[in-house]
Amino acid sequence: MTLALAPSASVRVAMRILLCLMLATMAAARADDTLRTRINDPQRGEANRARDVYRHPYETLSFFGLRDDETIVEIWPGGGAWWTEILAPWLHDHGHYVAALPPDTASDEALAGNKKFAARLASDAQRYGATQVVSFPGGGFVAPNSADAILTFRNLHNWMAAGKADAAFAQFYAALKPGGVLGIEDHRARTDLPEAAQLKSGYVREETAIARTRTASATQPSGKATASRSSSSSRRTEQKRSVARFVLPAEADQRPQMWRAATASGTPSPIHDAAS
């Protein structure tokens, strides 16, 4: 006589957890491999690839904790489409890349950049054809609770200098899903020089940026998971948070350094070195 014994409820739960962990590990490994492939893609512009040694794209995007099956919004990618060349192809198969351009009311320079960006998208439909284009700031932005991550590169100092940082943060946090990440990169200002003058020249103090992101995050409800939330976000907590990377001035140190601001707890973790 043969007996078939069904596993207990606890064993079934443990098996499901193990399976989920295995699948998550496999997805993370795939995302990591494809990210390196996209960064080393010879189809990227030669001038853009030459900046990799300074901008460290792999370290930056990995530090933000991104996955290739997520909806990722880039704020003001610019006519050069530096990050677009990496993000759009990387997200093409499993995720969704959204480019948020300045609105039609922006400056002539910004609108010229929009035209250049549109030409870049049109130049290669296979690589960029799935890109969604929206506008920021204003009503043309993405829907609330729709983004796994929102990225902004070297823009924070401009918004702070113009007194528009709080409004920008409010739109970002509203658009993020529960557990979503706001990724910020900017140049680190010196602490021994007046801050206002440095903001105008493109630099922001680390402690100031941390304080502003904490304040903005504290005013936004963390929310609960919704049915529209992607499965890839399940590795994160329910609290929306910011993750920021600061680049030291070239004359001070060629190695970019990063800090992570855990806005939910209000306690930043130690600085991480992107070049290590």
Image (cartoon, rainbow, N blue to C red):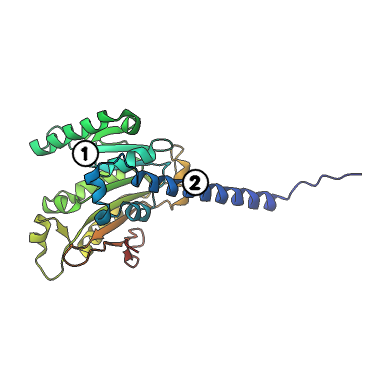
Q: Quadrant of residue 124?
A: top left
Q: Nearer the viewer, residue 43 or 113?
A: 43
Q: Nearer the viewer, residue 214 or 256?
A: 256
Is residue 106 left or right of 225 when viewed as pictured? Answer: left
Q: Is residue 257 visible?
A: yes
Of the 4 image quadrants, the one containing the N terminus is: top right
Q: Residue furthest bottom?
A: 192
Q: Residue at x 47, y 51 (%)?
A: 235
* Residue 183: % across, % down: 30, 51
Is residue 106 left or right of 246 when viewed as pictured? Answer: left
**Residue 261 versus residue 119 in the image, above or below:** below
* Residue 169: % across, % down: 24, 49
Give the amino acid at mark 1: Phe
Residue tagged 1: 136
Per the image, label 1 sits on a secondary structure element best described as loop
Give the amino acid at mark 2: Ala
Q: Residues within 10 Å of mark 2 (few under 14, many from 20)?
A: some
Say whether disc 1 or disc 2 marks the residue closer to the N-terminus: 2
